Image (cartoon, rainbow, N blue to C red):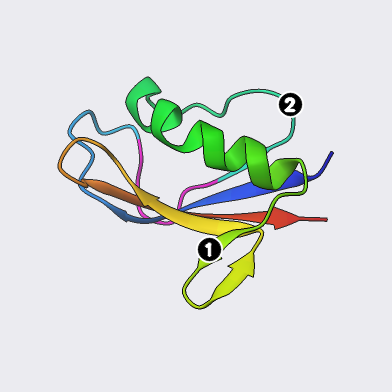
Amino acid sequence: MSKVKVSVTESRCRGGYLKKGDIFIVDDLCPPICHELWNNIYPSLYAIKNGATLDYGTERRRMFEAKCPDEGRVCIHCEVIE
């Protein structure tokens, strides 16, 4: 299985957990992020980690962007790394 790089591109995290510029590499375990954001991104992250491609603009790529369900306070970019 591939690894996924999770990059925080913007943050106004209410709990102060995530800062802009934070990077996490997801291999086997959940990274230290809040459960609301993890629950939101897990299906897409699992898919690209296991070979799926997702709509990314006008292309299909093994990456995606997402926002925290708490008013979009945290924005992330996830991409497969080899």
Q: Residues within 10 Å of mark 1 (few under 14, many from 20)?
A: few
Query: Quarter of the image holding residue 1?
Result: top right
Dot 2 or dot 1: first in sequence order is 2
Q: Position of residue 15 (x, y in %)?
A: 22, 28
Residue 39's place in the image compared with 59, above or below, is above
Disc marking residue 36 = none
What residue is at 63 percent from the left and 50 percent from the top?
5
Q: Amino acid at mark 2?
A: Asp
Counting labels gives: 2
Judged by depth in the image, the label closer to the viewer, 2 or 1, is 1
Magenta stretch: dominant SS? loop
SS label for mark 1: strand
Image coordinates of residue 39 in percent, x first then y, are: 42, 26
Q: Which residues are magenta?
A: 18-23
* Residue 6 % position (x, y): 55, 48
The residue beneath circle 2 is 28
Q: Which mark is residue 55?
A: 1
Residue 5 falls left or right of residue 27 = left
Packing grade of label 2 (10 A; few <14, some 14-19, many >=20) is few
